[in-house]
Image: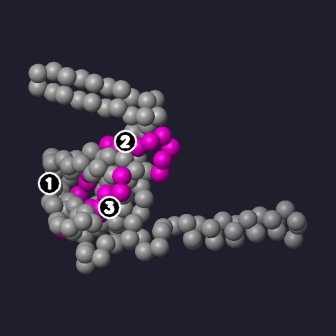
């Protein structure tokens, strides 16, 4: 066996071992029946957008560059996202079926059907999305995060949610 081949084997072993330890934080809950597919990503410089009309007022002000993601989430019947948070806000619209959202504060189920939207404020707001129906569900999430930040941060199951 050549020296180059030995180094390749050693590097592969180290990579596999590192991946096993970096897969998720201790106590994290794995997603099941949940697929997140990035559709688009835009990168923007600092934003300072202000729009005011008689019927609409919008302010979007960022310090530093932003990544804006559009992600399609498919959730199989009985599937769930695993407990997680994001470093910035997500605007979520249910596009197919029905999902139930849970957060770590009260673990109160909030159901959203196709056509309904909600906001995940991110910044440590730990939550889980579940499909508690017998049909497929999908959401589209538009996420705003700081440039090059990790988009999803896995979290352990809260003590007050027993499922």
N-terminal label among 1 and 2: 1
Residue 114: x and y in percent read 16, 51
N-terminal label among 3 and 2: 3
In this figure, which colouring scheme has been used for the structure?
one colour
Disc on res. 113: 1
Position above or below: 76 against 56: below
* Residue 94 shown left or right of residue 158 in the figure: left
Dividing the picture into quadrants, the one containing residue 157 is bottom left
Position above or below: 110 against 90: below
Residue at numbered disc 3: 126
Q: For mark 1, does the 10 Å Cα neighbourhood hold few (<14), some (14 to 19), or many (20 or more) residues? A: some
Q: For mark 3, does the 10 Å Cα neighbourhood hold few (<14), some (14 to 19), or many (20 or more) residues? A: many
> For the magenta stretch, what is the residue range?
123-150
Residue 3: x and y in percent read 88, 65
Is residue 131 visible to the viewer in this orientation of the structure? no
Quadrant where the N terminus is found in the figure: bottom right
Quadrant where the C terminus is found in the figure: bottom left
Residue at numbered disc 2: 144
Q: For mark 2, does the 10 Å Cα neighbourhood hold few (<14), some (14 to 19), or many (20 or more) residues? A: many
The residue lying at 15 percent from left, 46 percent from top is 115
Mark 1 residue element: strand
């Amino acid at each position: 066996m050549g020296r180059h081949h030995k180094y390749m084997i050693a590097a592969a072993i180290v990579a596999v071992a590192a991946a096993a330890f970096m897969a998720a934080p201790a106590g994290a809950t794995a997603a099941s029946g949940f697929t997140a597919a990035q559709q688009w990503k835009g990168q923007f410089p600092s934003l300072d957008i202000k729009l005011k009309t008689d019927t609409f007022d919008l302010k979007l002000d960022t310090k530093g560059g932003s990544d804006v993601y559009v992600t399609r989430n498919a959730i199989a019947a009985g599937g769930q996202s695993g407990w997680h948070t994001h470093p910035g806000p997500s605007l979520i619209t249910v596009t197919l079926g029905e999902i139930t959202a849970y957060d770590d504060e009260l673990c109160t189920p909030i159901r959203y059907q196709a056509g309904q939207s909600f906001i995940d404020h991110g910044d440590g707001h730990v939550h889980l999305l579940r499909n508690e129906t017998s049909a497929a569900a999908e959401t589209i999430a538009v996420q705003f995060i700081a440039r090059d930040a990790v988009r999803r941060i896995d979290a352990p199951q809260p003590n007050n949610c027993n499922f």
